[in-house]
Image (spheres, rainbow, N blue to C red):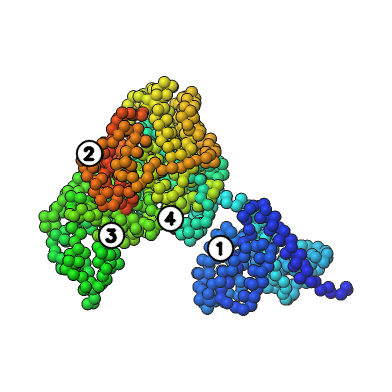
């Protein structure tokens, strides 16, 4: 027998590290910015563990691995350790994860459970049951091997000894060394006998291998996302049939695909979830993606399909062009759902699913807004009543009650005292005059602008009398209900940037003026903190998906005429971070470009600081014909032949509206892509005419789209045009400076966007300009409340009206949301139910629990 040979591990280790360093350098040259990451999790502070870890960290640094040492205290619980491992499993910058054993914890922790919580693809120590099982089964190319056996095998191979056919003896049978060494030699074709002992450690090698596997499986920055295949049918079935033909991915699975951590997602069943704002903090250094806004020509009763185009575009970008892409859309009100309009989930093969969830309660955000809004309304009338029926002293005693003999101001009361210039925090030190100023809001009932709300179409609440009970002692007043989405709280939700910012905006909401003409806010009423509590969950965006499996944020749904008609800034910001610098976020602005897009730029982008890359302008052939003077359309009656037969002359006349909206978009310095949303009755000549005229009018591109019938495939040309436009030079600019006088800002919008000759302020509007300017609100942006059916104030005037003066009937303030809204004509804030509402057809199957008749 030949004498035993002593193998020098130091020499081999140096060679291995040199090889690994070269491999890391090669990976980083292949993918700039990429670096293999190793995380070492330690519980407690054992000296031997500290020594092992310092050695690993030094070796990792030498090779070029980014190694992170996470040290949890000895007091850590099992749940805390598991949560930390889960977080590291989900961290895309960590490719290898080691848990230093033994765990030095005061409390009992199941080591087996901890080890098996490590994601198999990051188990570079090879200690999970999955890794052990693969090794035992001989799947050596698809598992990590514990470091000591792997090191031993490296040493044996360096000697040049042939392993196959030899008889090997393993001394030891531990899970970490002996047993895996036995399996490793066995699958290298040795005959193995097992007995007892230990050896070296090369965890860095497994981390490099893990990083290589990561690069092989995915492109850094690109989501590893599973798209759904559509089975298209002709004729196209109903929206609800199509929605139900698709099986949505579990929402938790989608969240993982797009890079969300489990701790950032709150599940609401299988198909929807809320995403926490902490995601923004985690991704704050991630560059934003490309920002696209979808708008349209002046809408007609025929419909232009903005929502359908938005969804079709993101399906094309994601499922067909394999880009990271998010849709960000508004949540619809239940009023129209049960009334006459129906839902807003898109249509045909371009929808958000499941559409029943989308169009009904979703996650309760609108209910939260309803509750918060009505709390303010109740506080206003209660405060007026109590001030009218009590002395200053009685009011003070009730507002600042003595508890166990101690009087103390609440935080919100201290802030009110500060606003009044009373720098005191002891209730006993206030003078009678200071008590009077503190307890008396002295609200002028004639100036109350805050209404109660309900998310139901109810015409009989448009004007009501409250306070008729004998307990209110004759203190009645006339008021009204609005639909919930018309509440300023909805506009606040859409424009807020954080929980802290929302708290501030909710406190700034002005509900009335005092008899001295001073603004009264929700903070003065003492209710703003409670509003924030009611809205704390609503501020988190709702995650859903399209038919083809691309992610969608559904968040906020402010009215598009009296408010700004756009989904939330928070949803856009999170989405822009998640898609990364090469991805796209597509959001939709309500109504035509003269309303929704103008407000998107001048209000939403002004507050968010986000700069859009592309405007997608949706148009249909038949709607352009109506703008060209086509006959009136009546619901339920077949379309006149002008809309279903070729008529190039009528179409060219109506192109003027699309031309004007292209110019409106170009005023802001953004490239415009026209999406011609095609119907089967449109002729090729008509489509080509619109495309040619749009390009001549200055559109970056114009393309035909068939996404309603074909899903994302029917919007691929649009998606490619949007990609090209996003690379084109742009010079985004806002339309006006907010420091300009209120009247000047209104005039700029009227003349440059609507095409008006001038504006005319009626007496009430002129009075409000003076009031708001005096109260310090004159520097807010303008949110025009105007009909969406015409560029002018007259809904009957189609095309591009000229020679008109825009009348401003009144001006109101949404100070918390952050805009003034001039009223052009009469705006209905409470829809009514038709003779036959949609709810006639809606019912629930008690066996399957399926909602029937919704659409």
Q: Distance between the Cα atoms at labels 4 and 2?
A: 45 Å
Any part of residue 433 in sight: yes
Q: Residue furthest front?
A: 740
Question: Sequence-wise, which precedes: disc 2 or disc 3?
Answer: 3
Foreground disc of the pair 1, 2: 2
Question: Sequence-wise, which precedes: disc 1 or disc 4?
Answer: 1
Question: Sequence-wise, which precedes: disc 4 or disc 2?
Answer: 4
Camera-nearest residue between 59 and 687: 59
Q: Are marks 2 and 3 in contact (CB under 8 Å)?
A: no
- State the residue at coordinates (21%, 51%): 448
Q: Distance between the Cα atoms at labels 2 and 3?
A: 32 Å
Residue 454 position (above or below residue 17): above
> Which residue lies under the disc numbered 1?
88
Dot 1: what SS?
A: helix
Foreground disc of the pair 3, 1: 3
Residue 762: mark in rendering: 2
Q: Are marks 4 and 3 in contact (CB under 8 Å)?
A: no
Q: Distance between the Cα atoms at labels 3 and 1?
A: 42 Å
> Which residue lies under the disc numbered 3?
523
- State the residue at coordinates (20%, 53%): 517
Residue 111 position (above or below residue 224): below
Question: Sequence-wise, which precedes: disc 3 or disc 1?
Answer: 1
Dot 3: what SS?
A: helix
Question: Sequence-wise, which precedes: disc 1 or disc 2?
Answer: 1
- State the residue at coordinates (55%, 59%): 90
Q: Position of residue 239 (x, y in %)?
A: 42, 39
């Amino acid at each position: 027998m030949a004498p035993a040979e002593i193998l020098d591990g130091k020499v081999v280790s140096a060679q291995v590290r040199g090889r690994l360093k070269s491999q890391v350098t090669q990976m980083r040259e292949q993918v700039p910015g990429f670096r293999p990451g190793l995380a070492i999790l330690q519980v407690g502070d054992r000296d031997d563990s500290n020594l092992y870890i310092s050695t690993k960290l030094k070796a990792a640094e030498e090779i070029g691995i980014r190694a992170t040492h996470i040290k949890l205290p000895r007091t850590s619980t099992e749940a805390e350790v598991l949560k930390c491992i889960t977080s590291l499993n989900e961290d895309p910058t960590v490719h290898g994860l080691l848990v230093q054993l033994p765990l030095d914890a005061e409390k009992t922790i199941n080591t087996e459970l901890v080890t098996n919580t490590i994601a198999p693809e990051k188990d570079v120590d090879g200690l999970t049951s999955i890794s052990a099982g693969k090794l035992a089964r001989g799947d050596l190319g698809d598992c990590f091997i514990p470091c000591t056996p792997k090191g031993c095998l490296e040493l044996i191979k360096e000697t040049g000894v042939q392993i196959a056919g030899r008889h090997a003896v393993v001394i030891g049978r531990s899970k970490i060394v002996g047993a895996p060494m036995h399996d490793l030699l066995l699958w290298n074709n040795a005959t193995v006998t097992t007995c007892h002992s230990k050896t070296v450690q090369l965890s860095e090698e497994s981390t490099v291998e893990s990083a290589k596997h990561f690069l092989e499986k995915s492109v850094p920055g690109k989501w590893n996302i599973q798209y759904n295949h559509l089975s298209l049918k002709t004729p196209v079935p109903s929206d609800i049939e199509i929605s139900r033909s698709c099986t949505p991915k579990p929402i938790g699975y989608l969240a993982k695909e797009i890079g969300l951590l489990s701790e950032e997602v709150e599940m609401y069943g299988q198909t929807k979830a809320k995403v926490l704002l902490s995601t923004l903090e985690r991704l704050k250094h991630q560059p934003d993606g490309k920002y696209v806004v979808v708008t349209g020509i002046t809408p007609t009763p025929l419909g232009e399909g903005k929502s359908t185009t938005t969804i079709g575009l993101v399906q094309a970008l994601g499922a067909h062009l394999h880009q990271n892409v998010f849709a960000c859309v508004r949540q619809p009100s239940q009023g129209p759902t049960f009334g006459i309009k129906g839902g807003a989930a898109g249509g045909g093969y371009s929808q958000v699913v499941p559409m029943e969830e989308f169009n009904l309660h979703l996650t309760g955000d609108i209910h939260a807004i309803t509750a918060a809004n009505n709390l303010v309304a109740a506080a206003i009338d209660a405060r007026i009543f109590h001030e009218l029926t009590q002395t200053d002293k009685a009011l003070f005693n009730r507002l600042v009650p003595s508890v166990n003999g101690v009087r103390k101001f609440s935080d919100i009361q201290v802030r009110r005292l500060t606003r009044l210039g009373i720098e005191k925090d002891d209730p006993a030190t206030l003078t009678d005059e200071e008590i009077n100023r503190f307890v008396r809001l002295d609200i002028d009932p004639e100036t109350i602008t805050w209404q109660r709300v309900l998310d139901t179409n109810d015409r009989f609440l448009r004007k009501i009398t409250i306070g008729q009970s004998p307990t209110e002692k004759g203190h009645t007043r006339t008021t009204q209900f609005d639909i919930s989405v018309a509440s300023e709280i909805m506009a606040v939700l859409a424009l807020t940037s954080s929980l802290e910012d929302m708290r501030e905006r909710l406190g700034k909401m002005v509900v009335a003026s005092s008899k001295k003409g001073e603004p009264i806010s929700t903070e003065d009423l003492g209710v703003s903190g409670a509003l924030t509590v009611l809205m704390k969950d609503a501020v988190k965006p709702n995650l859903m998906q399209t038919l083809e499996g691309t992610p969608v944020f559904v968040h906020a749904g402010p009215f598009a005429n009296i408010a700004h008609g756009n989904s939330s800034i928070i949803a856009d910001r999170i989405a822009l971070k998640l898609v990364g610098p090469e991805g796209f976020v597509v959001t939709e602005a309500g109504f035509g470009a003269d309303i929704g897009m103008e407000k998107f730029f001048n209000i939403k982008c002004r507050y968010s600081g986000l700069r859009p890359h592309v405007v997608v302008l949706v148009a249909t052939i038949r709607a352009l014909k109506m703008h060209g003077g086509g006959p009136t359309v009546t619901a339920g009656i077949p379309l006149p032949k002008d809309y279903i037969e070729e008529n190039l002359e009528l179409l060219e006349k109506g192109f003027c509206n699309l031309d004007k909206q292209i110019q409106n978009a170009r005023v802001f310095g953004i490239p415009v892509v026209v999406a011609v949303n095609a119907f089967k009755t449109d002729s090729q000549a008509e489509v080509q005419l619109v495309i040619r005229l749009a390009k001549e009018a200055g559109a970056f591109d114009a393309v035909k789209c068939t996404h309603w019938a074909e899903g994302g495939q029917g919007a691929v040309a649009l998606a490619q045009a949007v990609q090209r436009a996003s690379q084109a030079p742009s010079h985004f600019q806002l339309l006006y400076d907010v420091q300009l006088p209120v009247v000047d800002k209104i005039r700029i919008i009227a003349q440059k966007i609507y095409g008006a000759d001038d504006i005319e302020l009626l007496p009430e509007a002129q009075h409000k300009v003076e009031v708001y300017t005096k109260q310090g609100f004159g520097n807010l942006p303008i949110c025009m409340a105007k009909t969406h059916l015409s560029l002018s104030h007259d809904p009957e005037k189609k095309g591009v009206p000229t020679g008109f003066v825009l009348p401003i009937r009144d001006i109101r303030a949404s100070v918390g949301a952050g805009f003034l809204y001039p009223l052009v004509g009469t705006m209905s804030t409470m829809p009514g139910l038709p003779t036959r509402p949609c709810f006639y057809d809606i019912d629930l199957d008690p066996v399957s629990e399926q909602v029937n008749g919704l659409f």
